[in-house]
Image (spheres, grey):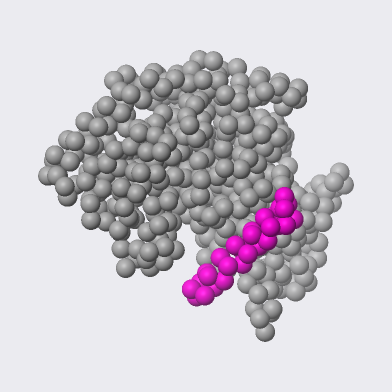
Amino acid sequence: MKKALVINSRDNVAVALAEIKLGEKLSIEIEGKTIELIARSNIPFGHKFAIKQISKGDEVIKYGEVIGRATADIEVGEHVHVHNVESLVGKIREERKS
Amino acid sequence: MKKITRSFQGSYLLDDYEPSVGASFISTWLTVFHGMNLTFRGYVRENGVGVRNHVAVICTVGCASYAARRIVELNPRAKLVVHHQGCCHIPSDIAYVEKVLTNLALNPNVHSVLLVSMGCESVSAEKIADEISKIKHVEVVRILDEEVVKAIEKGSEIVKEMLKESKKAKREEVDISELKLAIKCGGSDFTSGIISNPVAGKVADMIIEHGGTVIFGETTEVIGAEHILAKRGEKKEVSEKLLKLVREWEESITAAGLDLRGGQPTPGNIRGGITTLEEKSIGAVCKAGSSKLVDVVDYGDFVNKKGLVFMHTPGREPEALTGFSAGGAQIILFTTGLGVPQGHPISPVIKISGNPEAARRLTEHIDVDLSKVFYGEESIEEAANRVLDEIIEVASSKFTKSEIIGYDDAVEIYIRGSVI
């Protein structure tokens, strides 16, 4: 069984299809190519983790679309969620207004 | 009265059972790959084809709900539709509630209607009844005009006659282009965006290819993905209507002091792994498939166009399902991750989930288990064909899980102004 899924080749995150433990070695398939990485956090079932280095302020991409912006540097294999990503929906409007 | 089956396998209302629907899996494949006609067996009425033959007992105001409930207790084959609106609204909301109650009654799944009114409420039961009577049989009982017990007795006698009359209606074979399917998501988790929503999107595309109608809504969930949807407007006006609607909705929420990011995604979504509203929106919008958007309508408007239609609705289920049902949707396809119980008295709700844990634990909620897609054993297309088969069977008389467990009283009418 596949343990993680990358939905679009542009994505910088993968989705865990099973619970992943800190330090676990993972092989992930992206359009036929396999990349190897080590989990740097416990990743709950269904949550996302970085498959590329993401710097603070970078766009987080899933479905090939921007789903938010990193609020901290995120290492490959690290859990990506509300603690290190913010939504841009309200933010864009605030910036437009000012 | 004949016995109603309560088994989860082959669950049909016995005197409504249509044995001819069994082979529809093969028919779907033949149709999809060989261009043959897809059909279901429904009740042909003046304004559409019903998949159910309800005698609906609808209260025009929350205060009359107890009497409506008692009338249905005396006539268990009638369908109870109770809500909490109908009085003490601002004028625009009074008109809104009248429109939604009228259109709910006009849903082709409804054979005939008893309106149960107090007689003192803000909405006009007479106005609603006048509109309904143009299409189907409707009667009104007013509690304040009678003694309470007499009003219930009178209502019960009317419903008994309507039930007798409704038995004369028979199902006929009709083309799937007569189907208006609404698609809604709820209890979303990461599997919704990658499995159940893409599967629903494929089903939506197939129904529209065959000339049918698909309605979707949940304006809040479009925020963050409106740019993707707007590109699909059939005409420029449709795209502009959608963008304007989403912008105004977002502004109204912001003006009310609500931090969208605080409320959406919900704590349940976040536990499931959805991080931002954009992520939820993009995953949600894919449930509508890839067809051109032909129209954008207001909440509860009766949908007349064929093709993909967006209806302005809130995300909360009782209001959204009621809006779709008022739009004329005979069936609602509900994509879920966590496995919610949603149902609606007028329009049967078919729930699908790609979360293997939910599908295994919540067999009483999930109509079609998509966990084979999760395990890589089935493609999105194959799963979509199974879902289309289920839709045809439900359209032709099969009970949904929520109809079996009896969760079909979540009706609410969405209003905009204050309750005064």
Left or right placement of residue B41 versus residue A6 in this view: left
* Coordinates of residue B336 in the picture (x, y in percent): 56, 45
The residue drawn where x is 23% and y is 56% is B120
Identify the image quadrant of the C terminus of chain B: bottom left
Q: Position of residue B247 (x, y in %)?
A: 61, 67
Q: Is residue A54 left or right of residue B357?
A: right
Eyeballing the image, is B27 above or below B182? above
Question: Looking at this view, is B418 or B273 the one in front?
Answer: B418
The stretch drawn in magenta includes residue B251: yes
Find residue B20 and report its image quarter. Answer: top right
How many numbered marks are there? Answer: 0
Q: Is residue B295 magenta?
A: no
Give the quadrant of residue B94.
Answer: bottom left
Q: Indicate the position of residue B115 as horizontal and vertical percent values.
A: 30, 42
Tell me if residue B196 can be seen: no
In the picture as drawn, the residue positioned furthest to the bottom comes out as A98
Task: Please indicate, yes or no, whether residue B247 appears anywhere in the rendered image.
Answer: yes
**What's the magenta region?**
B229-258
